[in-house]
Amino acid sequence: MTSLRRNTTFSVVFAISFVIGWSLVYPSESDPKNIKYVFWKIGLYRMDLDTALGTMIGDRNRKKLVVGKTKDQLRGKFGYLLPPSEACPYMQTCYANSAWKQNVTVLLLRHGPWMVKFEGDKATDLMLCKG
């Protein structure tokens, strides 16, 4: 076996072992360290978007997924955005009680617990609505 072939084989085995090990250490889909969520964040895995929104709650870097993105980019990542008027009553109340209800555009990420503030077409803030 040539040196290049041996190194390639070792690299592939190492990568597969690394991914399997990571999956065993962080098996829960609601853990932001779960391999599926990490790969979804960088665009390498098509995770269930509602699960991803729930997992974002524990992600310390969640704002990086949203802030600075356009509405089209967010639709590409999260599927769809909703105006507060089309949300469930809980989210409508959250919006009505927020400081964002005046002179700004606010959209929700799917039917999840996240409100996004926009200035122009760019997201400027992300807020978790929780009771």
Image: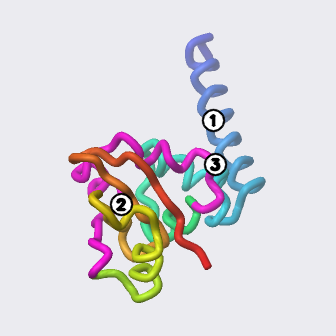
Classify mark 2: residues with Cα within 10 Å, few (<14), some (14-19) or many (20+): some
Q: Residue furthest top?
A: 3
Residue at x 58%, y 63% (from the top left corner)? 55
Question: As shown in the figure, which amino acid type bears the numbered disc 3?
Answer: Arg
Mark 1 secondary-structure assignment = helix
Magenta-tinted stretch: 57-85
Mark 2 secondary-structure assignment = helix
Q: Does the magenta-highlighted stretch encompass residue 77?
A: yes
Residue at x 39%, y 62% (from the top left corner)? 100
Residue 49, horizontal then vertical, whole percent: 42, 66
The residue identified by callout 3 is: 60
Mark 3 secondary-structure assignment = loop
The residue identified by callout 2 is: 78
Classify mark 1: residues with Cα within 10 Å, few (<14), some (14-19) or many (20+): few
Q: CA distance from mark 1 to mark 2?
A: 28 Å
Q: Residue furthest right?
A: 25
Q: Residue furthest bottom?
A: 89
Viewer-closest of 2 and 23: 23
- Choose mark 2 or mark 3, whichever is in front: 3
Does 50 sit above or below residue 99?
below
| Number of the label disc, if any, that sits on residue 15 | 1
